[in-house]
Image (tube, helix red, strand yellow):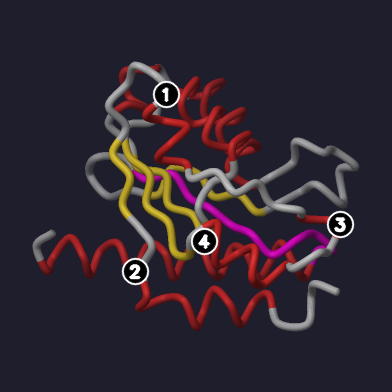
Amino acid sequence: MEARNHDKHIGYLLHCVEVSKRARASGNTPFGCILVDEEGTVLLEQGNVEMTEHDCTGHAETTLMARASRLFSKEKLWKCTLYTTAEPCAMCAGSIYWGHVGKVVYGISEKRLAELTGDDEQNLTLDLSCRTVFASGRKPIVVIGPFPEVEAEVVAVHAGFWS
């Protein structure tokens, strides 16, 4: 990955961290994502809404994809990148797949997230990489991550949250 794209990825991931901070401050779990078009414009941002909306599907990425699919064509979404603080779970990866986004960039892996959340019943993560979910389909979705450069910032938002 060329340095310029790497630096852009870091910037967008740090934007996701800010979204995750707002999600936590609103009473939700600390996850955030953004949708960026091919010109680099942030089209949507979304924090987790599972707690405040009382919706088990209220993960940031799934909620963002529901919104995005109502606003944009599949052709446009295929040229977009979804950036997210943590690797998308199986449900969110499915939403991204069916929503037709062509690229996913994440900060920390599902395995690292599981280390943070432990046995907290709010987030008993699946040990299933989004790469495996996407590879099971028939769309060549590009996945980039994790990014050790943003791990400290992502992890800091989770500090003291999980039991």
Residue at (31% x, 18% y) in the render: 75
| Residue 102 appears left or right of 34 | left
Q: What element carries label 1?
A: loop
Residue 30 is inside the magenta segment = yes
Residue 19 position within the rendered picture, expressed as x and y whole percent measured from the top left: 59, 63
Which is nearer the N-term, disc 4 or disc 1? 4
Residue at (60% x, 64% y) in the render: 113
Residue 89 position within the rendered picture, expressed as x and y whole percent measured from the top left: 59, 44
| Residue 160 appears left or right of 128 | right
Quadrant where the C terminus sits is bottom right
Q: Residue 121 carries which label?
A: 3
The amino acid pointed to by label 2 is: Gly
The amino acid pointed to by label 3 is: Glu
| Residue 64 appears left or right of 29 | left
Distance between the alpha carbons at the discs numbered 3 and 4: 20 Å
Q: Are marks 2 and 1 in contact (CB under 8 Å)?
A: no
Distance between the alpha carbons at the discs numbered 3 and 2: 32 Å
Residue closest to the eye, 19 or 133: 133
Residue closest to the eye, 127 or 1: 127
Which is nearer the N-term, disc 2 or disc 1? 2
Quadrant where the N terminus sits is bottom left
Which is nearer the N-term, disc 3 or disc 2? 2
Instruction: Kindly identify which residue carries mark 4.
Output: 85
Distance between the alpha carbons at the discs numbered 2 and 1: 30 Å
Instruction: Kindly identify which residue carries mark 2.
Output: 11
- Give above or below for 79 relative to 35: above
Discs 3/2, front: 3
Which is nearer the N-term, disc 1 or disc 3? 3
Q: How crowded is mark 1: few (under 14 residues within 10 Å), some or many (20 or more)?
A: few
Instruction: Kindly identify which residue carries mark 1.
Output: 136
Q: Is mark 3 on a helix, strand or loop?
A: helix
Q: What element carries label 2?
A: helix
